[in-house]
Amino acid sequence: MDGDSDKVRQHGKIRISEIFGPTVQGEGALLGMPTVFVRTGGCDFRCSWCDTLYAVDPAFRADWQPMDANGILARVCELSNDRPVLVTLSGGNPAIQPLETLIDQGHEQGFTFAIETQGSIARPWFAKLDHLTLSPKPPSSGTVFKADDLAACIVAARKGEGAGPAITLKFPVADDDDLAFANHVRQLHADIPCYLQPVNATPAAPHPDGANGVDIDALTEKYRWLVDQVAQKGWFDVRVVPQWHVHVWGNLRGV
């Protein structure tokens, strides 16, 4: 996080990397669901295999547009032809941004909201979401996991007046160490559904016309390995899912 980001948040603006769709959610519990993506700029992590550096690296800050909730919803409505749709809040780490007003106003217009965050920053407005995906980053990411931070995110999501969001854990897995990490963390929160997916280690191109080649065969082989590991270990309470959008579109932005 940086000083410029703090100033933007103080004025109620949300730093936006891109808004695109309608498309479908390409991974996790909502795989295949039609959605419009609102991708925020900025992140408190820097994963070694990050595939959205254009929404993470401050070098791309000039491409991030400060927008208020009204402007974001107007763009979403334009893309969805004024029909309520699932809005997926992504990043970077969208938990950095002041998203409560966007969620409140969007709900008034019939939109539903899903967010994916690494579980490093808890926000009271998590309780207003419809879907919350917490994706703790494993050892291969090169980042440090803090169990208390993840637990705080879950507590925040469950403090609302209503039922709160549907919460899932989603772990990117590159190797045996990542798999052991996922097993440890999922056992800390055994009441929350768990999803595993292979790591896509190909960085996304910074511009919409650059797809960046992805080794689909290698990614498929990693998925097969992950399925075999889950079967051998008898983890029959987890779901193994691909990053389906990577298989279909590679790392092309805005699809």
Image (cartoon, grey):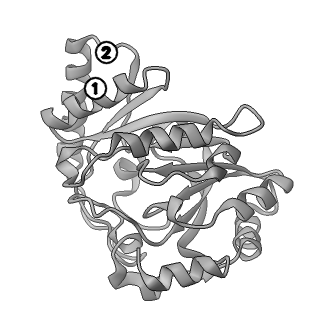
Q: In front: 11, or 209?
A: 11
Q: Relative to 85, does residue 203 appear above or below in the rendering?
A: below
What amino acid does circle 2 point to? Trp
What amino acid does circle 1 point to? Asn
SS class of the residue under badge 2? Answer: loop
Q: Relative to 56, does residue 112 appear above or below in the rendering?
A: above
Asked whether, in this view, residue 149 is left or right of residue 123, the answer is: left
Q: Marks 1 and 2: which is nearer the front?
A: 1
Q: Give the residue number, with chain letter if any, for mark 1.
A: 183
| Quadrant of the rendered image containing residue 209 | bottom left
Residue at far bottom of view: 62
Q: CA distance from mark 1 to mark 2?
A: 9 Å
- The residue sitting at 35% across, 22% down in the picture is 187
Q: Relative to 92, does residue 16 appear above or below in the rendering?
A: below
Regarding residue 255, the answer to whether it shows in the image is: no
- The residue sitting at 40% across, 38% down in the picture is 170
Mark 1 in CB contact with mark 2 (< 8 angstroms): yes
What is the x, y in percent for residue 238?
A: 39, 22
Q: In front: 44, or 203?
A: 44
What is the x, y in percent for residue 180?
A: 20, 29
SS class of the residue under badge 1? Answer: helix
Q: Give the residue number, with chain letter if any, for mark 2.
A: 235
What is the x, y in percent for residue 254?
A: 49, 67
Residue at far right of view: 108
Q: Relative to 182, does residue 7 appear above or below in the rendering?
A: below
- The residue sitting at 66% across, 46% down in the picture is 129
